Image: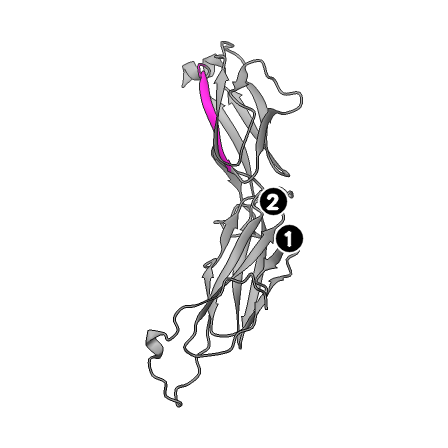
Amino acid sequence: MNKFCLVCACAASLSFFSSCSKSEPENHTLYVVYPVNYTVLYADQVEDSLIFETFDSYKAAPLNTDWITITAGDSHDVTYSPYNLYSFKALLAIAPNTTGKTRCGTVRVNSYDYSSGGIYYQFGFLNINHPSPSYQYSDEFSKLIPESANFELELAADAETDSICFDVTNPWTLEFSEGADQTWLALDKASGEKNHNNVTIRLTPNTDKDNARSTSLVLKSGEITNVINVKQQAAKEEEND
């Protein structure tokens, strides 16, 4: 019996089992509380869980998924009682998704004669809020689940400031790509701690009436990197708008 399981009897005697008649039928159920249908993770997220309720002992395991492992709560034995509905949590370790593509995994739980579980989609990109991602979809996933994403910030010729906003689960760095033009854009910071961050960028206005200009930044969280392309319009592009 795994001592790390979060086990609790919802009630010593559940209200809807108030009768103790010997003729009362057995009650067995398996209900997944989280995730409901599915959940979505970003590429650098390395922890999650499967939460469910049952009257019975159970066993849980990833289903044909090598990037999810159960670190605690893969099984638990209980003495069955129709009056005790237990809540369990299996803790999951998620490998960082370095493929650049969305992947899908399932964790299955079996209890009594029932089988259920949770579906986990893990994006191949970080949770960048600004610039907004441009999603690409594949027949492999539904239109609700993008296969990949690009990030591009397009600015007016006279723009002098903007920002890069993101949520990450590790300390991060934001640097220019190798060989990128650094002459007209500067960052107010190049590293920081996990959770929500906002990096201010400062630009020199583009006075070239014939040519737009571009550069690229690399955001890194743990093992995951994403390129953010920054484009500034030519001066005449803005005049013609």
Query: Dominant secondary structure of the magenta stretch?
Result: strand
Where does residue 99 sit, x and y in percent of width and height?
Answer: 65, 44
Up/down of 192 relative to 58, above or below: above
Which of the numbered marks, if any, corresponds to residue 167? Answer: none
Instruction: Indicate which label's residue lies in the foreground, 1 or 2.
Output: 1
Where does residue 24 sit, x and y in percent of width and height?
Answer: 39, 86
From the image, tell me which residue sits under label 2: 101
Mark 1 to mark 2 CA distance (whole Å): 14 Å
* Quadrant (top left, top right, bottom left, bottom right) of the N terminus: bottom right
As for residue 165 lying within the magenta part, the answer is yes
From the image, tell me which residue sits under label 1: 67
Q: Earlier in the sequence, mark 1 or mark 2?
A: 1
- Identify residue type, mark 1: Trp
**Residue at x 59%, y 56% (from the top left corner):** 105
The reply to whether the C-beta atoms of the residues labelled 1 and 2 are less than 8 Å apart is no
Tell me where the magenta segment starts and ends, as one range. 158-167
Looking at the image, which is closer to me, 123 or 210?
123
Disc 1 is placed on an element classified as loop
Decide if residue 220 is on the left or right side of residue 79: right
Looking at the image, which is closer to me, 203 or 189?
189
Where does residue 64 sit, x and y in percent of width and height?
Answer: 64, 61
Quick one: label 2, few (<14), some, or many (20+) residues within 10 Å? some
- Identify residue type, mark 2: Lys
